[in-house]
Every structure is written in structure tokens, then in C-alpha cells.
Amino acid sequence: MQITRRLEFDAGHRIPDHKSQCRHLHGHRYALEITLSGDIIGKEGDAANGMVMDFSEVKSIAKQHVVDVWDHAFLVYKGDVAVLDFLRSLPDHRTVVLDCIPTAENLAETAFAILEPMYRDTYGNHLRLERIRLYETPNCWADAIRPQP
């Protein structure tokens, strides 16, 4: 069985090598979808009885480790020195420094790497993260998918 939880957040970024508008500082209303797979829990009296995982717990984990960290922050590549220096000059500015250029693809992969261990077999029901889908706009998204064995 698979379940999916969607969360939204706002963040700024830029793609330094982009040939068009995205090379400029700008922001997006991102949407993050977390898809998990696992067995349906069948334990009488258990709060998660009949579920793969309680959607509120899916949300809580994603918020703590990704959404609340990235929300209303500027996501900047550590090699984008001019922008990084500028952001550091702003008092108390919320900046997240990344090892990768903050494209939708790289952000989806980064979120997958952060969240994968957080969901792993939480209930003993073979729970695992299958996919992170990150919408940069309503019409553009990237999927980070669990590699097939």
C-alpha cells in the first residue's frame, strides 16, 4: 500500500548558471509530496490501526526535518559566493546553504536523503519512503524515487 502527504512552503533560490530568468534571485511556492509504502497496520487498540502511517505523523516528520528548515529561507548553493556573501550581510536572514545548486531536481534528492531514514520502518510494517515529488510551480516538478534493487 502507498500513501502520500502534501505540504507547501515558500523559499527563494537562484540557478547561477541558468541562461534565462532563473539566474536572478527569486522565490517559489513549493509543494512537497511524500509517498510512503508499507503494510496496513492491523492492531486492535492501536491509534494507527488500519493505516500505513498516520498522515499527521508523516506531516510532523517532514515539517521538522525539511519544511520548517526551508520555509521562508533562501536556498543557496555553497559555491554561489557572491549571493552567499550578500545573504550573510543581512542580519538574521534565514539562509540554507546547500552542497548542490537548488534546482527542483537537486532539492527533491536532498529532501529524499534527509527524510528516508526518518520514515524507515517506523511501525514495524515495512514502512519506507518511495518518492519525494517537489513542485517548483504547479506545472513543473521533480521526482526523487527510491532506486530499484
Image: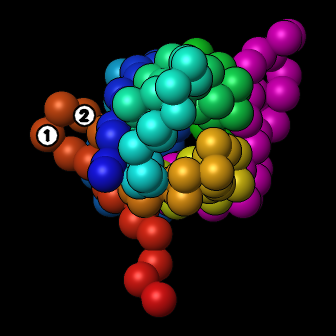
Residue 54 marker: none
CB within 8 Å, label 2 to label 1: yes
Specify the segment rendered in magenta.
Answer: 78-107
- Residue placed furthest toward the left: 139
On the image, the x and y values in percent for residue 83 come to 68, 39
Disc 1 residue type (three-letter): Asn
On the image, the x and y values in percent for residue 133 come to 35, 48
Residue 85 is a magenta residue: yes
Q: Is residue 82 left or right of residue 111?
A: right
The residue depicted at 21 percent of the width and 45 percent of the height is 140
On the image, the x and y values in percent for residue 40 come to 40, 43
The residue depicted at 74 percent of the width and 20 percent of the height is 94
Residue 137 marker: 2
Disc 2 residue type (three-letter): Thr
For residue 136, above or below residue 125: above
Question: By what rule are the colours in the image chosen?
Answer: rainbow
- The residue that label 1 is drawn on is 139
Front position in the image: 89 or 92? 92
